[in-house]
Each structure stands twice: as structure tokens, then as C-alpha cells.
Image (cartoon, rainbow, N blue to C red):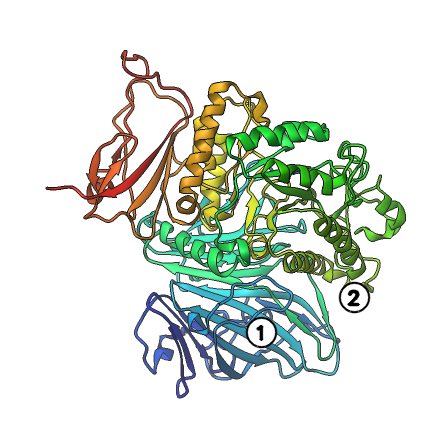
Amino acid sequence: MEIVYHERSNVFHLLNDTISYVMMVLPNGHLGQIYFGKKIHDRENLSDLLELAVRPMASYVFPGDREFSLEHVKQELPVFGTGDYRSPAVEICQENGSRISDFQYCSHHVEKGKPTLSGLPATYTEDATEASTLVVELMDPVTKVKAELCYTIFAEGGILSKSVRFHNAGSGPVQLERAMSLCLDLPDCDYEWLQLSGTWARERHIKPRKLTMGIQSIGSMRGNSSHEHNPFLVLKRPCATEQQGEVFGFSFIYSGNFLIQAEVDAHDTTRILVGIHPDTFSWRLESEESFQAPEAVMVYTDQGMNAMSQTFHRLYQKRLARGYWRDQVRPILINNWEATYFDFTEEQLLTIAQKAKECGVELFVLDDGWFGERSSDHAGLGDWTANTKRLPAGIKGLAERIEQIGMKFGLWFEPEMVNEDSDLYRMHPDWILSVPLRAKSHGRYQYVLDFSRKDVVDCIYKMMAKILKDAKVSYVKWDMNRSITECFSVTLPPERQGEVYHRYILGVYDLYDRLTREFPQILFESCASGGGRFDPGMLYYAPQGWASDDTDAVERMKIQFGTSLCYPISSIGSHVSVIPNHQVFRITPLHTRANVAYFGTFGYELDLNKLAGEEISEVKRQIAFMKEYRALLQFGIFYRLKSPFEGNEMAWMVVSEDKRTAIVGWYRILNVVNDRFTRVRLCGLDPGLCYQNTQTNSIRFGDELMNFGLVTSDVTAGEVPADKQPCVDFESRLYILKAVSISK
Ligand code: DGJ
């Protein structure tokens, strides 16, 4: 990896074995973009790739020159109002009301490794040789606002990360109205756009559309990254597949309001913007104050969608997630939520834990309902002390009893919320986000605490830290069950109210930071009514997240398949739950529920005492299987093979680094009578190795499995031979492939 600066042509070239990113200082002093894509040779005059044209109706920068128009050049920090009519990356409102600025190149320097972003989650390096960073400083000569554009290229993979820091070196205040983290101007628009969208219980479905002239965007203005849109975008060439072709991935390391948009102009160039949503953002910068915009990550590959995902998986698993749990296989847990909801006693919990222990489960998680006066969702949030009517010996006593059974103990919190019916609210009614004299919207009978206030965060921290210190807690599930409304903080002056959404999420990060530092051995799992804040920002603090409240195996296929576009398998919280399923009331076989949940952190969300004897034996086998293979399932190289968004079947697989072991998951949603012959073409195997298939006992070469495919035919529906089991709906199979030596 290298960062080259060509002084004569003023060109910057960031390159590694996979990608090149080329920029130059433009004739007007702005920073321009030249190229991002597959690695190209370096040369002094890459600046001659700058494309200019005489175009009627354009506005030009230099008198007499009819070529250099900001509307038609690719830029790093474009502004609106000086000739570029596309959406800008930055907007600064000044004391005289003007929003025009003019960011001129001042200087640059190169750093080894990657600097941290103060108060924000970000990717990191462990060793300075893993990445190099170019920092380019620009300044607007009138306001003296500086912009520090920070570009990190990693040594491995097609990864380029970008963030921006603004500093007001002027003498008066300015109002930052837009501070996008990334602007990428692509030279054409021949792309298919894929977004991960949905709603509660239907998160991160893959939604494709063709890029076309105009603006297309996804975003959130809910205060959390949201169930509706994930801060992630793929642009792929229409012919690109999972295995080949050009793909760009854009991911935003942030958990609050965001905007990702593509603007295709009249000449088919595409401007990508990624950043904090400008509609709910405004930041006062007094003289000598700074603002740090979060990090955006771009991945480029010409090897297809799987290669893009694998690059994100490696980066987010190893250089975004942190701490003790980053590299550890995850404990198999049982969570009492769907087993009891709010209706439990300590004895009942212990009975659930006892049975789970017998089956091999390692961690018991007590979900909502253990604190304050919480016997339903109407009361108690904010009062983080155990309800001793339910738990006579408190959390400490319960945790001890669980440990005595031989399991670890985990606990649910919803730190950012308060019920009106709570001691905390009665004591501090002004601690919530709300506008004085106006109605307060509630969601699930709760209000959102004003986490932009340090005193509020401090108080919640104290309550949580006390519990975590007193009791032996090994895992925390951090929930968030409503979005923000009436976003207003009584502690901030009028000109700073536009800062509240961002200050709120900084408060959330601060609390996560304090707790994860103080309790480094605790495994944190993020959650927001399922997958309402399943984003890279959360992954920095919590290496796994509850992917969705929908635990049905068939629904989960789409959710987990979509999630895998960006997020590693080790981060995807997935459990086996009861039938009929509690969200869609579907009845699926136990083995299919497990076969889906194995491709995640794995656990159970039911009372195992209610299962029949042969089901318990099956659960024991599942747990033994997961213990044997979880390192491979959670940390192996993951491939999507067949999409549930495109047909009746889904398949995916993981392969070990040395390619000697692989696990393939194959799933058929509805049974098909007298079906065609089917096979799945596998990926990532060693073509010259022979693999024994534990399901069929057959031995096949890797090249055969990858080209002819793994046979999954099942043509027995409608007529069942005596020696065969009848096929059913929601069928699935796992195939374990192990390299063996054979004599030819
Ligand atoms: C929403 C979560 O996603 C569920 O798993 C559960 O923890 C409930 N909240 C509890 O209120």
C-alpha cells in the first residue's frame, strides 16, 4: 500500500494491490476526484484524466475560460451555489446569511496507520503497517473554516475509508448545516443499486433498482439508524453476480440519522453522498471549535458481491469490533423473552435454565421485566434496580444461582428509555427529549431520555455499573424500543437545538464506551426492537446484535441473507424459537430452525421444558454440533450461493481459511411435487482437494463441487418410496465437507 503525491501535477494516488484512489488539486484550488476503482499504474500526469468540456448553460470559474465548470468536474468537498448544481457535501451558514464557501487546498501530510476519531466508533489498525492515512487540509478564506479530509487505505483488500473534521479558525461563529462524510463522483451511471430495507420484523431485505437520472436515496430521521434502511449501499454493474463483476459497497459507521444518496446528472455521472442526515442536523461552530463527522467506508472489487461482503466481514470483524469477545466463539445462550415475556418468577427462570444446562446451553439471559415496577411495558424503565417481589435475592442472588447450575448469566437493559410510571421520571420529568408546552409522543408507553446531557448519561451509567459490579453478569443485551420524537433538549440554547440528534448518539456511544471499558469481559449484544440499530457504529462496542424480533426460520432466511451483505456472521444474533412461531405463527421443523440459526451467534428463545423427549435429544445434538463447528461458522469465509429473494431455495456456506472444511446450508421454502433435479454450485473450495460429504458419504473433488455442483435433488414429493422420508415444506439440510486423501 502506498500514498503517492506528485508535486508537479498536484496529484494524490492512494493504491494497494487491489485499488487506486486518485485525486488532484484543481485549477481553482479545490480538491478534485480523478478515479476510484481497480488498481492502475501510477504516473506523474494522472491529472490529464481530468475531463473538461464546453457545455452550454454552464457557469464557469475563470473569466474567458469555457471549460472549467464546477457542474462538470468530480470533487471531494463540493459546495452549492458556485456553479455546481448537484447536492453538496458541505454547507456552512455564515453570520451574513450566506451559504457559499470555497474550500482551497492548504496542505497535506501522510500518517502511518489510522488516527482515532474522538468520541466516535471507527475502524482501527493494530499495527501501523496495516494502513496509511492521507490528511488533506482545505480552508475557506472568508470564514477561515478548515476542513481536514482524512483518507485511509488499508494494505489488504479494496478498502478506502474517509472522514472529515471541520475547525473554525475564524473569529466569529458559523453554523454547519451539512457535513457529509463522503462524496464520490463516479464517471457513469451504469449500476444497479441495492439497499437493505424493511421494517420491524422484516429488516434488511435486499431491494434492487436501476440507477437513473435524478436523486435516489435512503436514510433515517428517527434518531436510530432504523429498521427501515440500513446505512449501507451497494452499486454493482448490472452483469455482476455473487462470484464476479464490479461492485462498490458503501457503509457508514454511525448509529443515528443518516443519508446515503446517489445523484445521476444529465451527463450520467453519479454523485454518491454518505453522511449524517442534513435535514435533522445543524452544528454551531464557535471560534476555535471543531466538529468531527463520522467515518464512511468504501469497498471496491471486481470479484463480485461475495468478495465485497468478505472484505467488509474481515474489516468489521477484526478492525471495527474490539475487545475480549472480538475473536472468541460466542456462547450458546437461552433467552427467556419468548418463553415467558413479562410473566415469570425466579423459580420458573431457574427451571428454564436447568433444562437448558442439561442440553448444553452455556449462558442464561434474563430479558425485560426484572426491575422496578415492570410487570408490563407500562412501567419501570429507568429504575434499574431489581424487583425483589419477583427476584427475592435480587440480580446478585439470581446470578449466583445460575452460576451454581453451571451457566453464565446475562441481563437485559434499555438504558436510553424511561416510562412515565417510574421513579426516575417522577424525579426528573425534564430529563426526556421533549419541547416545553408541547405534547410528548410516546412509543410503547415510554419516552426517550435526553442522552445529549452528561448528567443523564452519568446517572444511567451509575445504576448500570452498580448492578454489573454487584452481580456476576457475563453478558448484556442493550435494547432500544422506540425512535426519537420532539427532539429538543432543555439544556441547549436555540441555536444549538439542531445538534441534539447527534449529541444524543454521542451520549449513547459514551455510555457504551464507559461500560465496555469498565467491564471488558462482558459480552454486549446490541438490539433495538430487533434490528432497528444493527449498524457498524454499534459493532464497535457490541460485537453482536439481535438481528430481528422475527424468529421464524423462513423469515430469518431473508433477514440473515440480506444482513450478510455487509455484516459478519459472528455479529448476527440468531435463535431457535418455539412453534407455532410467535410472529408469523408458522410451523417449521426443528432442524430447519437450527440450520438457519447456526449461521449466526446461535441460541434458544423458548422453554426447553415444553419440548418432547425426542426434540430434546435433537436439541442436544444441535448444541453439540454448534460447539464443534461454531469457530468455522462464525469466523470462516462466508459465501452466499442462492438467494431467497429470487426463488424457492436458499443456500449459503462457510469455508475454513485452509479450505479443508466447509459447511453448506441448503433450504427449500415450499415443497415441490415431482421437482426438477437441483444442485448448488459451491465456492471457495480447493479445486484439487477431495471432500467427503458427511450427509451423503460421497467423496467429490473441489472442482466438481464448484462446477457441476452439490446435488440437492429431492424428487420424492407426491410418492414416497418405502426407504425414504416424505419431503415437507420448509426443508433444509446441512452438508459438512471435509478434505480427505484418496488413492487414485
Ligand atoms: C425488543 C427486543 O428485540 C426483544 O428481544 C425483547 O428484548 C423485548 N424488546 C423486550 O422488551
Please give the name of the residue rendered at 26% of the width and 29% of the height, measured from the top-left corner: 696
* Rendered location of residue 433, percent (x, y): 79, 52
The residue beneath circle 1 is: 82
- The mark closer to the camera, 2 or 1, is 2
Badge 2 amino acid = Glu
- Please tell me how crowded label 2 is: few (under 14), some (14-19), or many (20+) other residues with Cα within 10 Å: few
Quarter of the figure with residue 551: top right
Label 2, ligand 1: CB separation under 8 Å: no
The residue lying toward the viewer, choosing from 686 and 106, is 686
In the drawing, does residue 658 fall left or right of residue 355? left
Q: Which mark is residue 626?
A: none
> What SS does tag 2 mark?
helix
Could you give the CA–CA distance between mark 2 and mark 1, rounded to whole angstroms? Answer: 26 Å
The N terminus appears in which quarter of the rendering? bottom left
On residue 495, which mark appears? 2
How packed is label 1: few (under 14 Cα within 10 Å), some, or many (20 or more)? some
- In terms of sequence position, does the residue under pointer 2 or pointer 1 come before the other? 1
Is 669 placed above or below 335 here?
above
Q: Position of residue 711 (x, y in %)?
A: 25, 32
* 720 in relation to 149, above or below: above
The quadrant where ligand 1 appears is: top right
Is residue 633 visible in the rendered image? The answer is yes
Indicate left or right for 719 with 219 as reference: left
Q: Is residue 66 visible?
A: no
In the picture provided, is 6 more to the left or to the right than 260? Answer: left
At which x and y percent is residue 371? 77, 39
Residue at left 56%, top 54%?
539
